[in-house]
Amino acid sequence: MIRIIDYKAGNAPSVMSSVRHLGFNAEYARSAQELSDATCVILPGVGSAKATMESLKAMNILTQLEKAVLKEKVLFLGVCVGMQILFEHSEEEKTEGLGWFKGRVVKFDPAKVRVPQMGWNKVKFIKNTPVPTEDVNNAHFYYVNSYHAVVDDSADLWGVSDYNGELTACVQRDNIYAIQFHAEISGEIGLKLIKNFLDTGVKIC
């Protein structure tokens, strides 16, 4: 079962609409119990890292989420803030993240770039993973972000963009995938990436 975590600071309905449009069966997860049958988990994100962490803690879902993803190796996709909280620390309201990836989330320098980054930016996928990206490589995806991830281990980098310098667009390690951009509102190219991800989950399961 594909489970999309629905929390106050998220954008679950938009992600759900995309997943069902592609013909996949998915349900929301609004409690730890509803994650117990997950074969794939998607964590959407809109808003701040702090609000996201507080919402997930209020749901009492984090222990089951870590069990599913880190121990049971359920396929996982984090989107936007859903990617940022996977790191150790965010400068946004000095928020401690989940620490699944080594690194930190920092704010764009408004003296150098427009903040937030809002609009389309090209994503270059730089490593091969079980999720194929040949049909979406060097395509433009939609971003809305004032903060961006700085990874400690370059092996975790899945894709990059250019925003007055290299920007972490997405990360991957084992069963964990995460994207800074919003594939669910990136039109046909975004749907292709989501389909590639979910098709991989079907093959694995």
Image: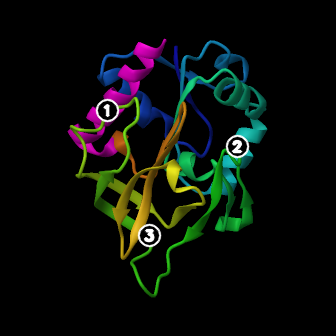
Using a 10 Å C-alpha cutoff, classify the residue at mark 1 as few (fewer than 14 neighbours), some (14 to 19) or many (20 or more): some
Residue lying furthest bottom:
111
Q: Which residue is mark 1?
A: 132
Rounded to the nearest angstrom, the CA distance separating label 2 from label 3 is: 23 Å
The residue at the point 42 percent across, 34 percent down is: 15
Residue 182 picture location, percent across and down: 39, 47
Q: Which residue was labeled with disc 2? A: 55
Callout in the foreground (1, 2) = 1
Mark nearer the N terminus (1 vs 3): 3
Secondary structure found at label 2: helix
Within 10 angstroms of label 3, few (less than 14), some, or many (20 or more) residues? some
Placement of 190 over or under 125, stated as above or below: above
* 61, 103: nearer the viewer: 103
| Residue 116 tag number | 3
Residue 46 horizontal/vertical position (percent) = 52, 50
Label 1 secondary element: loop
In the rendered picture of this protein, how many numbered marks are placed on residues? 3
Mark 2 vs 3: CB contact within 8 A: no
Front-lying residue, 125 or 139: 125
Instruction: Please tell me which of labels 2 and 3 falls first in the chain.
Output: 2
> Label 2 amino acid?
Ser
Res. 18 in view: no
Q: Kindly identify the residue that appears in the image at 55 percent across and 43 percent down.
A: 10
Residue 188 forms part of the magenta stretch: yes
Residue 108 percent coordinates (x, y) = 50, 74
- Range shown magenta: 185-205
